[in-house]
Amino acid sequence: MAQVLEFKLPDLGEGLTEAEIVRWLVQVGDVVAIDQPVVEVETAKAMVEVPCPYGGVVTARFGEEGTELPVGAPLLTVAVGAPVADGSAGHAGAAGAEKDEGSGNVLVGYGTGAPPARRRRVRPGEPARSVVPVPVPAAIPSRPDGAAVPSRPGEAAAPARPDGPVPVISPLVRRLARENGLDLRELKGSGPEGLILRADVEHALRSAAPSARVPQAQEAPAVRPVAVPAAQPAATAAPGTRVPLRGVRGAVADKLSRSRREIPDATCWVDADATELMNARTAMNAAGGPKISLLALLARICTAALARFPELNSTVDMEAREVVRLDRVHLGFAAQTERGLVVPVVRDAHTRNAESLGAEFAQLTEAARTGTLTPGQLTGGTFTLNNYGVFGVDGSTPIINHPEAAMLGVGRIVPKPWVHRGELAVRQVVQLSLTFDHRVCDGGTAGGFLRYVADCVEQPAVLLRTL
């Protein structure tokens, strides 16, 4: 007899808690082998193909393409040892036989106990969980309180008892109702099995008169002495297009907000004559061999500057009240892609020359463009180089990539009037800006770092001291 096993979205590592289904790689009824990729998901870090640790027949899929699921939510169910018609039966039997050997996959959570239950974030107007129904008992969902729900997604749920559990999962929905004095027991959910969604609460708030709603925090007084207009909830704001902050965009928003909230940053900048650096790059590329990019030269200058000013290659441990100076330079560089801004990381950049840095930049940039960067290639940076000059702008005040301590910004290189050797001349000028965590150093150190970078840009021969 077939045994039905439920495969849940595994922990993809690096602190990721959710992922969006981009593309299913299997259908219900397909035969899968152990560690065969079954779904492609997009996390806040990268696109990942998720392999299934079980071999057998797919009996159900949970979630349509575009659905966002938390770690620990069911992805699909597999009948292990189920008889399969046609020529695929041999593969199914082989897959079932391999089950005892276990999965060789290395994603976090494989072969371990079930991860702790997590609440799913439900977006307005979206089903809480889309299930391809099959006659398998294990695929029947249940509510958080353990109460049974109808086996058919279209079947209406029994109305909640006045003193019974409210059919709502999202804590955001509960909070929105609580803050606006709305009794959830009075609502009829539009989600599967009567689940109350945020859209239901927002609709109820728009339909009710503002004076009829009293926040629970103010329900204690018997009479409100003064009618004070309550602040309008977000749902009643002017109509417009809402863009969900999820995936890469959501991760960027979280990280930048945290950086601004936790890091007391400061910015200093300087203009530099990059004519000699551009001439040096032209001479290098004319000598043959792999082409050296401008970004690679700037990265090599950064690693040399960090060797002189290691305070900027550090992080702050506020719990221990310590500045941790890091021994290795893992250099991140900002890359704009169709999915948004990502920061791939070049490991051990301090051990690489310009040619090696250029090759690594090219490989990581191509992976960023195709969306195949792994979480490990997007984390662990200790210093970031941001070449926003590619957007045609001269300057910026970069936001530090938390938990790093500094970021160097590079503007466009353009011909400008410049005093060169005592005479006015047209030179290739670039603006360099350094945003730094003022906890790790003072302005003298930051200015010294930036001045050294500018000196190397203006006179590349300065780098010969460190080669």
Image (cartoon, rainbow, N blue to C red):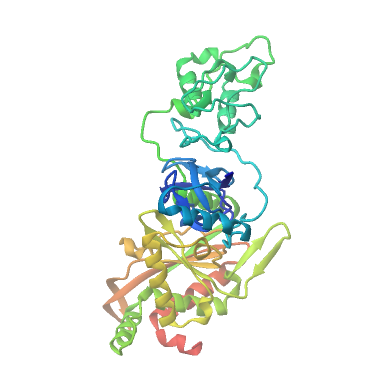
Q: Quadrant of residue 176?
A: top right
Residue in the foreground of this view, choosing between 271 and 98? 98
Q: Is residue 182 left or right of residue 164?
A: left
- Quarter of the N terminus within the rendering: top right
Q: Is residue 320 left or right of residue 295?
A: right
Identified at 57% across, 16% down, the residue is 159
Q: Residue at x 39, y 53 (%)?
A: 339
Q: Is residue 225 above or below residue 297?
A: above
Q: Is residue 452 above or below residue 206?
A: below
Where's residue 99, x and y in %? 59, 56
Q: Image height check: is 14 above or below 414?
A: above
In the picture, measured across the screen, residue 84 lies left or right of residue 259, that is: left
Relative horizontal placement of residue 244, taking residue 72 as reference (left or right): left
Whether residue 162 is situated above or below residue 28 in the rendered picture: above
Residue 452: percent from left, percent from top: 48, 78
Instruction: Tell me if I can see residue 271 in this picture.
Output: no
> Residue drawn 50% across and 47% down?
83
> Please, which residue is most extreme toward the right here?
320
Q: Position of residue 193 (x, y in %)?
A: 52, 25
Q: Is residue 401 visible?
A: yes
